[in-house]
Image (cartoon, rainbow, N blue to C red):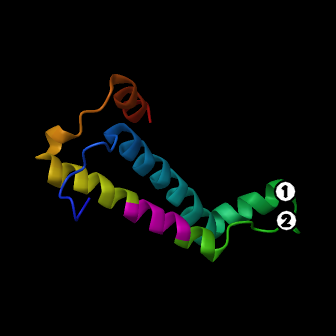
Amino acid sequence: NFKRRSTTGLSPDFCVLNVLGFACYTAYNVSFFWSTAIQNMYKRRHGPDAEITVQSNDVAFALHALILSSITVLQIIYYGGGVRALKLSKSVVFIIVGI
């Protein structure tokens, strides 16, 4: 995208849903990894010996994916001529509004 200065052929729907999905995944991993309250609720539900399955590499991947997918959306906006370049389908708009 940077070399061609164009995002022709790149689906804005896919990129926006990617950001939305990775934002949710990041929120889950970050809250599960750093919140002792959530970890305690998990242990109460699954037993005191339950292993916390979210590790630091999960948090790093989620943050990395969110940042890079956000950069892709920003490229669509920048190279496409502004926010109007994000011509989203009605179904994607409904998904975003629904969440």
Q: Residues within 10 Å of mark 1 (few under 14, many from 20)?
A: few
Distance between the alpha carbons at the discs numbered 1 and 2: 6 Å
| Amino acid type indicated by mark 1 | His
**Magenta-colored span:** 61-68
Residue 62 drawn in magenta: yes
Q: Where 68 falls versus 24 (above or below)? A: below
Q: Quadrant of residue 2?
A: bottom left
- Comparing 90 with 46, the one in front is 90
- 31 falls in the magenta region: no
Vertical side of 87 occupied by 16: above or below: below
On-image quarter of the C terminus = top left
In contact (CB < 8 Å): disc 1 and disc 2: yes
Majority secondary structure in the magenta region: helix
Classify 63 as above or below 91: below
One can see residue 35 in this view: no
Where is mark 1, residue-wise? 46
Label 1 residue SS: helix
Q: In the shown orientation, is residue 43 left or right of residue 35?
A: right
Q: Position of residue 85 (x, y in %)?
A: 18, 40
Query: From the image, which quarter does the N terminus lie in?
Result: bottom left
Q: Residue at x 75, y 68 (%)?
A: 52
Pick the front one: 76 or 54: 76
Task: Name the side, left or right, on which 11 lies relative to 85.
Answer: right
> Residue 98, relative to residue 49: is it above or below?
above
Residue picked out by circle 2: 50
Extreme residue in the left direction: 81
Quadrant of the rendered structure where residue 66 is?
Answer: bottom left
Q: Residues within 10 Å of mark 2 (few under 14, many from 20)?
A: few
Mark 2 is on which residue type? Ala
